[in-house]
Each structure stands twice: as structure tokens, then as C-alpha cells.
Amino acid sequence: MTEEQKNQLESGIRDVVDFPKPGIIFKDITPLLANGELFRLTTEMFIESLEGQVPDKVIGIDARGFIFGAAIADRLGVGFIPVRKKGKLPWDTTGVAYSLEYGEAHVEIHRDAVSPGEKVFLIDDLLATGGTAGAAIKLVKELGGEILVMSFLIELAFLEGRKNLDSDVRTHSLLTY
């Protein structure tokens, strides 16, 4: 990614102070999503992170990973799979719990979403503590899938989320703060 492209993406992200609680500076991506040129550029940059590899499926993590993941899957002509919060998928699922700063969360995937040996591209908008992303990696591997790359729009490096990810999974972030 060029410096100009990076600056373009950053122009679509605004800081919202004290959201969702005091002391937090939330990285709001909705201006980027609302701008067709920036949304297209973001999709292109995600695809570029594949470095020419072609996945069988794109997996998006609840909820903003769905936005980018579906667009990328369409662009690549492959299927899209959601990883959702517990109780949101309508069929037979497998899930994993993970720790949050205050408590625990749980994500699920349909048991037939990924076949053994399928290559997947895992997408989410934000890498913070790595809990959700780490859980998604576990689910894909449990089903026998191979993760080509896991890519994020934003990484909050000061939270050290990469430490909670499988070191065998190539991880890429478009923007790092």
C-alpha cells in the first residue's frame, strides 16, 4: 500500500472520544463505508493482502467483518461465511468462548461452513485484544480449514492483540494505530 492510499483510508476514519465509555477513543469507520471510492479502495487493499493467493471462501467476523468480507467474496467470486455471536446462526454450529476485558464472549460458525482442506481468507474491521479473532481462527482450524491470511482494516497495536492470535496465521492490517 502506498502512503497516498494509506492517507486516503485514514481520511475515512474519525475518532469518537468517550465512546462507548469514558476514556475510549473509538475508531469510527462509517465515513469510509459511506464513501464509495474509499470503500472500493479498502476492498482492493484487503484483496492485495492475499498476495495472489485465491481462497475457497471468505469469512467475516461479526459484525463489520461481514461488510468487507461479503464485498471481497463477491469480487473474488467465492463464497462468504459469517462467524457470529452465540445464538445468531440458525443451524448446527460449533463455537468457542473467549475472554474479554470484563467477562466472556462466544462466537459460532456452522459446522458445514468450511470443509477440511478449504482455504479461507479471514476478515474483520478491527484487531484490538485479539479475543474474537483468536476464537475465529480456532473455529476454522477445528473444521479443518486452512487460513491463507487474516486481514484487518485497523490494528490497535498498543493493545497487543497479535499475542492472542495463532502465530501460524499470517496477519495483516491495513492501518495501525
Image: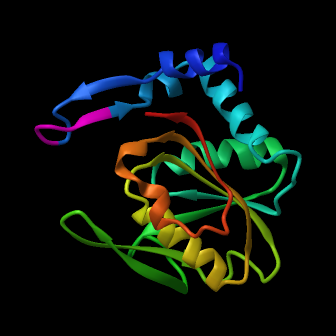
Q: Quadrant of the C terminus?
A: top left
Q: What span is in magenta?
A: 21-26
Q: Look at 36% across and 44% down and name the residue there.
A: 158
Viewer-side residue, 169 vs 75: 169
Asked if the magenta segment contains residue 110, the reply would be no
Considering only vertical position in the picture, is 9 above or below 81? above
The majority secondary structure of the magenta stretch comes to loop
Residue 123 drawn at (x, y percent): 60, 52
Considering only vertical position in the picture, is 146 above or below 57? below
Q: Look at 43% across and 24% down and name the residue there.
A: 13
Viewer-side residue, 115 vs 162: 162
Q: Is residue 62 visible?
A: no
Q: Look at 81% across and 56% down and name the residue there.
A: 78
Residue 26 drawn at (x, y percent): 29, 35
Residue 133 drawn at (x, y percent): 50, 62
Q: How many marks?
A: 0
Q: Quadrant of residue 119?
A: bottom right
Residue 161 drawn at (x, y percent): 43, 56
Q: Is residue 103 visible?
A: yes
Considering only vertical position in the picture, is 73 above or below 115? above
